Image (cartoon, rainbow, N blue to C red):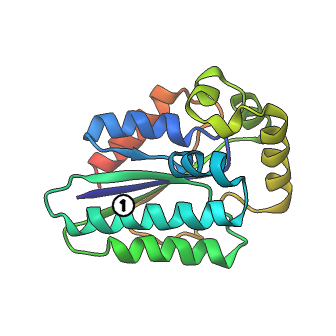
Amino acid sequence: MKIILIFGPQAVGKMTIGEKVGSAFNLPLLHNHVTLDAIWPYIGWNKDTFRLSDQIRMGIFEHIAEDESHAGIIFTFVWAFDMQEDRDYINTVKNIFKKDSHDIYFVELAADLDERIRRNTTEYRLKKKPSKRNVEFSHAELTSSAEKHRLNSYDNEIQEDKYLKLDVTSLSVKESSEKIIGWINNN
C-alpha cells in the first residue's frame, strides 16, 4: 500500500501534481479542499469547518489502513511547521498508516511567493476549489499565511526515510510529477 503525503504552501501545485502522481500509481487523491469545500458552504469558514474536515479525513484514512486490498491514497495539505498542532496532526496520520505493508512517502513542494500568487488564480484551480473563487479573500489568505507561518521545512528538519523536497517554481506539472514518480519508483 502506498500512502503519499504531498504538502507545501497554498497554490504550490499540490492538487494538480497529486492528480498526475495518482494517475501513475492508480491511487485516489484526497486534496485538502475536498472535505473543506464540502463543509464550509453550510457552516462557514471557521474552526468547526476544520474539525469536521479532520474527522472525515481520519475516518477515510482508518478505513484505507484497515483494508489490506486497498492500493493506498494521496493526501495533500498545508503544513505550518511553526505550529505544534500541525506536527501532531501529521503524527496522527503517520500512526494510522504505520504497518509493515504500508509505504509512506513524504513529498514537500516549494515555490517562491510570486509564482504561488500567479498560480492562485489559474482557471483550473478555481474550477476545482470553490473556496478559492473569492480571489481577494484567497489572495489575502495566501499572503498573510506566508507572513504568519513557516510553510516549508528547514534543511534536514524532516527525518523520514522516504522524503523528497522539490522546488517547483520553474517546473511544469509534468516535470514535477515525473520527478516524484521516478523518486517513488526508486524508493
Q: Quadrant of the N terminus?
A: bottom left
Comparing 110 with 137, the one in front is 137
Q: Determine whether, in the image, residue 148 is placed left or right of residue 115.
A: right
Residue at (54%, 47%) from the top-left corner?
Answer: 38
The quarter of the displayed image where residue 18 is located: top left
In the rendered image, which residue does mark 1 sit on?
60
Residue at (19%, 64%) from the top-left corner?
Answer: 67
The quarter of the displayed image where residue 136 is located: top right
Q: Is residue 24 above or below residue 105?
A: above
Q: Determine whether, in the image, residue 91 is placed left or right of residue 161.
A: right
Comparing 115 with 54, the one in front is 54
Q: Amino acid at mark 1?
A: Ile
* Residue 99, percent from left and from top: 24, 75
* Residue 111, percent from left and from top: 68, 42
Comparing 167 with 117, the one in front is 117
Residue 77 makes an appearance in the image:
yes
* Residue 124, percent from left and from top: 58, 24
Residue at (62%, 56%) from the top-left corner?
Answer: 78
